[in-house]
Amino acid sequence: MRILIYGLNYAPEVTGVGKYTAEMAELLVARGHEVRVVSAQPYYPQWRVHDGYRAWRYRHETWHGVPVWRAPLWVPSRPGGLKRIVHLASFALLSLPLLVRQAPWRPQVLMLIAPTLACAPGALALARLVGAHAWLHIQDFEVDAAFDLGLLQGGGASRIARAAHAAERALLRSFDVVSSISVRMVERAIDKGVDASRAMCLPNWVDIRAIFPLPEPSMFRRRLGIAADSIVVLYAGSMGAKQGIEILADVATALADRRDIRFVFCGDGAARRELMTRCAPLANCHVLPVQPAEWLNALLNVADIHVLPQRNDAADLVMPSKLTGMLASGRAVVAMARPGTCLFDVVSDHGIVVPPEDSAALAAAIVTLAGDPARRATLGRAARQYAQRMLSPQSIFGALEARLAALTGGDAAPAAGPQQPAGSAAPAARKSGTSGKALQEVEQSDAGT
């Protein structure tokens, strides 16, 4: 089957949407499909175009066996409301020539990854031109996030919001399939007018062979000089407006007198600079840059406790992609979530849930777990078992291929091409283009020194 994937983010971005889009493309190729990708120059989560790429140039490359055409875009160093709109619009506009270039290939399915929905008109136009089925896969409800999280404010915001939501509803109804990464996000799409027969839950997955509990202490403890008997609280992921990162600094400050508890914050994004500033005077904190993908398992295993902050108004606008790795690592998880959200449903049976934006409750949960190794072990086992049972790429991609076959009238499994063995997982962790500096950065980026 010929599948064109169209999305803003792609590898070598190692966090967020780009990671999952690249793994999806690679797995589809491994299962015998023909896949092409139209994407942007990699920039996330640093909000800076990666070394070796040029923001204002077109580029064609093959990434892990997948042909990728990259469009120019504008990347603001400090994304805000209007700047973010211009950023997304620049990719939507400048990627159109690359879409047109794919027309002679005549893809059978065109899958648009949201964000960004600004690319939907171009995607739908190409799909109709070549007779392809149009599929929208929603990782974030960007329109809701822009207004509910206050990313767009000021005079006329309510009028703009009404127009944006109306356009969003019209676009969503135009796709043959609309999928999202949690049941409640699918329900939100249906509430926006998507016919239930066209909606599908396609959750993010985790390679349980690449992410697993280590039998020995992680190398990061030695690199960071953390004692073997210290309790490590880890946040690893994007540091943007939706994550509520400022709560982490509040908790680390509140527990500064607990010499047995250390905090490791790893990632990048718009909120990282403020986090580093607030954590700089704290001896119990280490703030690290994004690490190479091949070190991800060691990073996740430095944790005794994973923390997942969340803003109260995020609700089911997003399902944090970092949760899959937390669960697969077999460590206790403390998440901020409201009852009735998908995040609450997942974590409440395999970890501890506290109210969003309640730093005192988060600190109390950390202290409780720090003093109860047996409970940490129990929660960690439950988390690992959930990942093995529910987050396997095998079952998720089986459902994806079945839906693709239903769209095109073909077989669920392609007739030719290399096949993944039964029980196979997502592609092995890919190397980052900046890994040459990583060891030095880990050893020198401790915000407490």
Image (cartoon, grey):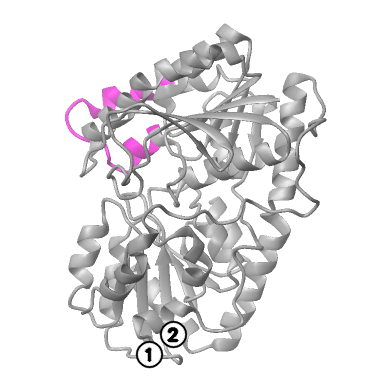
Q: Is residue 269 above or below residue 98?
A: below
Q: Is residue 21 above or below residue 308?
A: above
Q: Position of residue 138 (x, y in %)?
A: 52, 35
Q: Is residue 46 left or right of residue 201?
A: left
Picture quadrant where residue 168 is located: top left
Q: Which residue is mark 1?
A: 260
Q: Main secondary structure of the magenta part?
A: helix
As drawn, the label of residue 231 is 2
Q: Is residue 167 above or below residue 435?
A: above
Q: Is residue 130 left or right of residue 399?
A: left
Is mark 2 in CB contact (under 8 Å) with mark 1? Answer: yes
Other residues around mark 2 within 10 Å, as few (<14) / some (14–19) / many (≥20): many
Amino acid at dot 2: Ile
**Figure label count:** 2
Q: Is residue 63 above or below residue 255?
A: above
Other residues around mark 1 within 10 Å, as few (<14) / some (14–19) / many (≥20): some
* Residue at left offset 75%, top offset 40%: 418
Which stretch appears magenta? Answer: 143-167
Considering the numbered disc 1 on the image, is that residue within a helix, a strand or a loop?
Answer: loop
Picture quadrant where residue 410 is located: top right
Nearer the observer, 157 or 87: 87
Question: Does the magenta segment cover residue 147?
Answer: yes
Could you tell me if residue 316 is visible in this image? no
* Residue at left offset 73%, top offset 30%: 403
